[in-house]
Image (cartoon, rainbow, N blue to C red):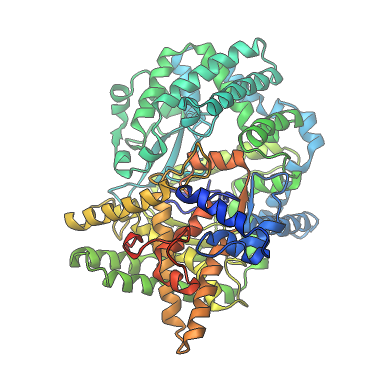
Amino acid sequence: MKSNWTPIKAAIVLALCAAQAGALPALAAEQAQQQSATAAKPAAAAVLPGDDFFTWANREWLDQTEIPADRGSWGAMAALADDNNARIIKLIEDAGANAKADAETRKVADFYKAWMNEAAIEAAGLKPLQPKLDAIAAIKDRAALSRVLGQSLRADVDPLNFTNFSTPNLFGVWINQGLIEPNVNLPYLLQGGLGLPDRAYYVDASPRMAELRTRYQQYIADMLKLGGHDNAEQRAARVFALELKLAQSHATREESADIQKANNVWRAKDFAAKAPGMDWNAFLQGARLGQQDRFMVYHPGAIRGAAAEVAATDLATWKDYLAFNALNQFADTLPKAFAQLRFNFYGKVLAGTPQQSARNKRALGATTAGLPDAVGKLYVSKYFPAESKRQVQRMVSDIKSAFEARIDKLDWMAPSTRDHAKEKVRTMYVGVGYPDSWASYGGLQVSSTDALGNVLRAQEFRYVTELAKLKQRPARSAWAMPPHVVNALNLPMQNALNFPAAILQAPFFDPKASDAANYGAIGAVIGHEISHSFDDMGAQFDAQGRLHDWWTKEDLAHFRAASQKLVAQYSSYKPFDDLALNGQLTLSENLSDLAGLAAAYDAFKLSHASKDASARLEADREFFTGYARAWRSKMRETALRRVVVTDGHAPAQYRTYTVRNLDAWYKAFNVQPGQTLYLAPEQRVRIW
């Protein structure tokens, strides 16, 4: 799930990804033989739960479902999001026709209307973007370049959202409390400036990555040519060479996940000495951070590398880089030729998506990005009943209690560590449905005829709003994503969770479904988010959200050793002959899947005990099946490969395999030695 809205999270986004037919690599041949031998049997008997629980639970859906032409992947979350989008589009269109709509609702309707007005966008051409392009063309020296780079800074990234990591600008800024100062907000500077999804796309020597680099360089040339630049191929070669140098200084995804490496406080005066090459005074003034004294430099290597290139690379190349970046970043809101060119590369080439999404879906995406809370308020008022909120809040309470009980039973944990872990659970803020207070858009000007102007003004409005936080105290109850997004997240620096209204629907939560199914689906999601406070990253923050070593040396050693078993387990999964999962990259999510599922199971059993053995067994089967069905999804090969390389989440099929570490799953489905997913009791990973 997308998380432009997610400040630091120990990785929550519930990925829209899965391999339709991936197998556990070590036993892939064996499984293929088993499936071949049963091919003549009825479909329901073709796969045993113990051989492939994902396929067993989702076989009918997998057989009947095709990935839509405008998607790189499709699944339970994507389908739910699509249904939600249709509802919200109808709400916005109705609001546009309502003369009595309030001012904020009118802004939502006008933003959407302007984006839908293709004729006006075609007629405007590049005119709305011309001030940016003129500012780039006017750069005469390194100080002016530094100033323009500072002016491009926007609050559009968060450090640990591995599905949306890069910012299109040279750096990203994120405003949040200090890592060791929970009562003070600071600006975090992060690496950015790459047109490809990750540094790996620039440095990986594989033929496939080499081909993508060639295609990307041609895309740069085509975009510059469409934007009116001559000698586009030569310019594109120089722009790509600059991006390659930037990428070589970037941290890897695994390095970015090491929060200790991000704990770098620089004074404003330090930049010139620690990252020479940039005119930092001009940059910070351009970014409206000239009065800020302290910064969190999340990626010092990338900051140094970029500053060095400001000095080393000729101004003409930088100007071409910035011009391409502007055209590329706003192509979707430019005339159709620009939007189509962008989709042909990012949609077809990188994601393997055959068809561009309908205009109204893209208009909704732009409107949500511009006025997230205003759109969310429309959705909640119509589609989120109060009873659903109360029911989910009761489940949250049950699962928090179950997690505390699990902590009490950990024989390897020292009393001091245990007490602090329980304090984190008890003091955790859990937002269900929507925020306690809504953002106001009173200062945002929205036109019904100027689509790109609206986008630019909304970005500026958000940036100013984020900068204002530097004079405010951090708020634990602040939300980081709008309520109409199908997602959920943990905010370790706030010791807080957000469960937006949109995910509190079937197949994740259904007020009419059994408790077993709900605890297996949304209960596991709730447990997952709670568990992020105790994954490899979240466990480094205390109850106040401070980066603080609250573990004994022995407890931390045990936790890390146990975690490496999960790293090894996931690194053994191989969707393709030439590409395996990265168990270290996906560790945070895998730890939270495991602990969250276990806590949800405990909560269900404690809250819904039955004396009848057969009823208990049937309830367990329903619980685990609900979990697997919540992860049903398919993904195109190109998109799956990108996810494996760049995403902090394992593909959904492999997340379903979390069940093989829980003893109750074996009993519920009579899983026996020799079956593909079977693990001997001593091989099952047990941490929390």
- Tell me what residue is drawn at x 52 percent, y 48 percent: 29
Res. 86 image quadrant: bottom right
Does residue 239 lie above or below 408 as drawn? above
Relative horizontal placement of residue 174, taking residue 359 as reference (left or right): left
The single residue placed furthest to the front in the displayed view is 37
Residue reaching furthest to the bottom? 611
Q: Position of residue 161 (x, y in %)?
A: 47, 46
Reply above or below: 107 against 294: below
The quarter in which the C terminus is drawn is bottom left
The image position of residue 398, as x and y in percent, is 42, 76
Of residues 42 and 403, the one drawn nearer to the viewer in this rendering = 42
Residue 62 vertical position relative to residue 367 in the rendered view, above or below: below
Answer yes or no: is residue 142 visible.
yes
The residue lying at 68 percent from left, 40 percent from top is 353
Residue 598, image x and y in percent?
A: 41, 68
Q: Relative to the observer, which residue lies in front, 437 or 526? A: 526
Left or right position of 52 against 103: left
**Left or right: where does residue 576 sit relative to residue 363?**
left
- Residue 580: percent from left, percent from top: 47, 42
Left or right: 362 with respect to 565? right
What residue is drawn where x is 24% and y is 66%? 418
Out of 294 and 332, give the one closest to the viewer: 332
Can residue 501 be seen in this snapshot? no
